Amino acid sequence: MRIRVLDIAYQTMADGPGFRTALYCAGCRHACKGCHNPQSWDFNAGSWMEVDELLDIIKADSMSNVSFSGGDPMYQAPAFTELARRIKEETGKTIWCWTGFTYEEVLANPEMAAMLPWLDVLVDGPFILEERDTDLLFRGSPNQRIIYLHEKPEEDIIPGTVPLIKLK
């Protein structure tokens, strides 16, 4: 399987807590006004990378967990689901995923929902420029939720998160 990748950031601390390998995928139809990464909207930007190749890159950095961003990874849900499954099974690293879809929209789409069991955190919802808040952690506007998809110790909860949403 292949993923259209715009960029990879190594040991970034901007895309979730701690050091992370962030995969920025190509392609997004949300076209949020004020998007911090509008070059990622083009589905033909970047280059194709095999899931095996991306997994090797992720495994090579023993210190970093993983973030999926973009673009919107949900537009390439089958390949990102395969990558997330392999990351969890082969490394146990945590995975954060940003999407312009709401959690409820993701749940309603079986292809997208298939990724959820392999993710630790979903940051959902479109960025709303009129509600921009630079004091928020890991998101741009308060409609965006940081959703822990599995139980998390109380001391690890980031302010503004939804501690647990049960998967259906």
Image: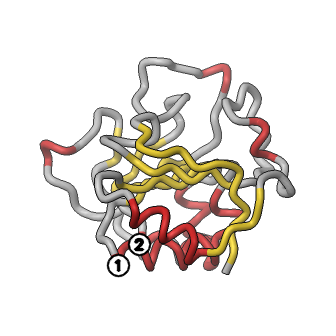
Picture quadrant of residue 11: top left
Residue in the image at 64% along x and 41% along y: 126
Residue in the image at 67% along x and 55% along y: 25
- Dot 1 corresponds to which residue? 90
Which residue is at the front of the view, 63 or 143?
63
Residue in the image at 77% along x and 53% along y: 46
Label annotation for residue 60? none
Give the percent coordinates (x, y) of residue 146.
41, 45
Image marks 1 and 2: residues in contact by CB distance under 8 Å: yes
50 up-or-down from 106: above or below? below
Point out the residue furthest to the front here.
60
Give the percent coordinates (x, y) of residue 157.
23, 43
Label annotation for residue 87? 2
126 up-or-down from 167: above or below? above
On screen, residue 84 versus residue 148, left or right, reads: right
Quarter of the figure with the C terminus: bottom left
Neighbourhood count class around disc 1 (C-alpha, 10 Å): few under 14, some 14–19, many 20 upward: few
| Element type where label 2 sits in the image | helix
